[in-house]
Image (cartoon, helix red, strand yellow):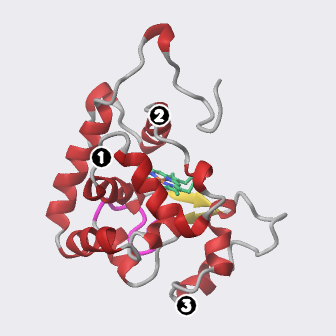
Amino acid sequence: MIQLVFGITNTSNIYKFWHAAGIPNSQNVSGDKENQGPKLIVAFSKKGFTVKETVALSGAHTIGQARCAVFRGRLYNNTHINAPFAAAVRAKCPGNRGSGNNNLSQLDVTSPTTFDNAYFKNAVSQKGLLHSDQQLYSGEFTRTAVDAYANNAASFMEDFAEAMNKMGRLSPLTGSSGQIRTNCRKVN
Ligand code: HEM
């Protein structure tokens, strides 16, 4: 486990922290799926992150799971998706919006519990679970970084650690001037 500044040591807390740091939830951009990737890049750049740093941070999806409600659209509407992979995940995530919303799937289908660079290799082979994961491989600038990390695990590890520490230094709100949200999507 990577020990971060401010003692955040598990991914659930990191995810909360990410939002507490003022980086908008992807929810804010989910209405426009085509431009979700670029919008996320812009959102992170407003917080001082380069494209490469944002791609490195996305590599956090090398572990953990996501809910069917979050990736259903990708499974049933996207073309840039590996067919056997899509079929396997669809079995756990029905196309009907009313059912299975909380069914979980691994964000990294190859090595879901190992922190490695398989997440990037998955994007190269169109096995990104989230629309935003796959979009990283569609954008000209982000694709370069994805290829670099897919080919060099050590550089991903190094850049990820640096980017996480950078995120940890983002204008932390202390005392009564801020709050750690119990639900990432709304003020407590
Ligand atoms: C510390 C880094 C990160 C962690 C620990 C993390 C973790 C997660 C987890 C656990 C989910 C699943 C949420 C759910 O199913 O409800 C998720 C979803 C998502 N993540 Fe990440 N993530 C990180 C960084 C990023 C970055 C840098 C990006 C974009 C550049 C990103 C984009 C997304 C998107 C678009 C979703 C779908 C959520 C939705 O539509 O509401 N994540 N993330």
Q: Is residue 130 visible?
A: no
Q: Position of residue 39 (x, y in %)?
A: 48, 56
Q: Earlier in the sequence, mark 1 or mark 2?
A: 2
Secondary structure of residue under mark 2 = loop
Q: Nearer the viewer, mark 2 or mark 3?
A: 2
What residue sits right under mark 1 in the picture?
49
What residue sits right under mark 3 in the picture?
84
Q: CA distance from mark 3 to mark 1?
A: 35 Å
Q: Is mark 3 within 8 Å of ligand 1?
A: no
Viewer-side residue, 42 vs 53: 42
Secondary structure of residue under mark 3 = helix
x 41%, y 14%: residue: 174
Q: CA distance from mark 2 to mark 3?
A: 37 Å
Q: Residues within 10 Å of mark 1 (few under 14, many from 20)?
A: some
What residue sits right under mark 2 in the picture?
22
Inspect the image, locate mark 1, and give the three-letter code of the amino acid beneath it.
Answer: Phe
